[in-house]
Image: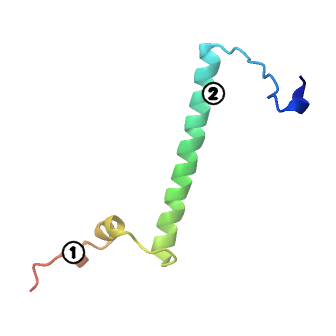
Amino acid sequence: MGADEGETPKTTQNSISKDQFLAWKRQKDAELLAKQAEAARKREEDIASGRALMNGRELFLHEPWVFDDTHH
């Protein structure tokens, strides 16, 4: 009855303190925010240079005159 017969190997669990978890969570959140900020910055650059198409919301924010139907 070893691992050769399709049994899953046993894993060990490491105990961590609440402070260790919170520090890890803060680090992960900071990394995620930095990644999202970089993606938003790159998207803005791509839109400004014309490399990316705008969605409706972005078009409304950047060129609201497109949605102005007061001029018949």
- Front-lying residue, 33 or 53: 53
Task: Quadrant for the N terminus, please.
Answer: top right
Query: Quick check: 70 left or right of 48?
Result: left
Residue 56: name its quadrant: bottom left
Q: Residues within 10 Å of mark 1 (few under 14, many from 20)?
A: few
Residue at figure coordinates x 47%, y 65% from the top left: 44
Query: Quick check: 55 left or right of 3?
Result: left
Query: Quick check: 11 left or right of 70?
Result: right
**Residue 24 image point, x, y percent:** 63, 27
Q: Which mark is residue 27?
A: none
Residue at figure coordinates x 14%, y 78% from the top left: 69
The kind of residue tagged 1 is: Phe
**Residue 9 image point, x, y percent:** 82, 26
Residue at figure coordinates x 70%, y 14% from the top left: 15
The kind of residue tagged 2 is: Trp
Task: Quadrant for the C terminus, please.
Answer: bottom left
Q: How is the image coloured?
A: rainbow
Q: CA distance from mark 1 to mark 2?
A: 46 Å
**Residue 68 image point, x, y percent:** 17, 76
Q: Which mark is residue 67?
A: 1
In the picture as drawn, the residue positioned furthest to the bottom comes out as: 72
Residue topped by disc 2: 24
- As helix, strand or loop, the secondary structure at mark 1 comes to helix
- As helix, strand or loop, the secondary structure at mark 2 comes to helix
Task: Give the tally of numbered discs.
Answer: 2
> Do the numbered discs 1 and 2 sit on residues whose CB atoms are within 8 Å?
no
Looking at the image, residue 66 lies above or below residue 61: below
Q: Residues within 10 Å of mark 2 (few under 14, many from 20)?
A: few
Looking at the image, residue 65 lies above or below residue 31: below
Which sits earlier in the primary sequence, circle 1 or circle 2?
2
Looking at the image, residue 39 lies above or below residue 55: above
